């Protein structure tokens, strides 16, 4: 339903509005989903990966994975 709140549109203007709304509805498809949230500030980033003893473990403990 379209309700004209202000003004006096001509029949041609109303037809143009209805055509645009109908074309938009016919295009269908779900609306675009928002971008996934950034993982930069997630609490999981604060948890360190476990350290495993073994050859080279001391050097590897300082490297980010």
Image (spheres, rainbow, N blue to C red):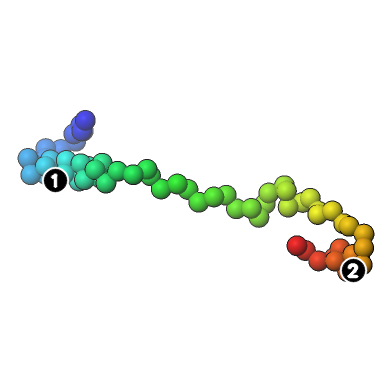
Secondary structure type for disc 2: loop
On screen, residue 45 versus residue 37, left or right, reads right
Q: Position of residue 34 (x, y in %)?
A: 47, 48
Crowd rating for badge 1 (residues with CA inside 10 Å; few <14, some 14–19, many 20+) = few
Q: Position of residue 6 (x, y in %)?
A: 19, 36
Quarter containing the N terminus:
top left
Report the residue at 54% width, 50% height from top: 36
Q: Which mark is residue 62?
A: none
Work out whether 55 lies above or below 23: below
Q: Which residue is mark 2?
A: 56
Q: Position of residue 20 (x, y in %)?
A: 20, 46
On screen, residue 32 versus residue 13, left or right, reads right
Mark positioned earlier in the residue sequence (1 or 2): 1
Crowd rating for badge 2 (residues with CA inside 10 Å; few <14, some 14–19, many 20+) = few
Q: Which residue is mark 1?
A: 16
Please identify, in this view, whether the residue under mark 1 or under mark 2 is nearer the observer.
Answer: 2
Answer yes or no: is residue 3 visible.
Answer: yes
Work out whether 27 lies above or below 53: above
What is the CA distance from the residue labelled 1 to the residue labelled 2?
72 Å
51 vs 42, nearest the viewer:
51
40 vs 55, nearest the viewer:
55
Report the residue at 77% width, 63% height from top: 64
56 vs 35, nearest the viewer:
56
Quarter of image, res 24: top left
Secondary structure type for disc 1: helix
Answer yes or no: is residue 17 visible.
Answer: no
Q: Position of residue 65 (x, y in %)?
A: 75, 62
Work out whether 9 lies above or below 60: above
Report the residue at 20% width, 33% height from top: 2
Report the residue at 89% width, 57% height from top: 52
């Amino acid at each position: 339903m379209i309700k004209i709140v202000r003004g006096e549109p001509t029949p041609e203007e109303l037809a143009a509005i209805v055509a645009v709304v109908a074309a938009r509805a016919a295009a269908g498809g779900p609306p675009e989903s928002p971008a996934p949230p950034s993982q930069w500030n997630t609490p999981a980033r604060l948890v360190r990966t476990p350290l495993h003893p073994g050859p080279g473990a001391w050097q590897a403990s300082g490297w980010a994975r």
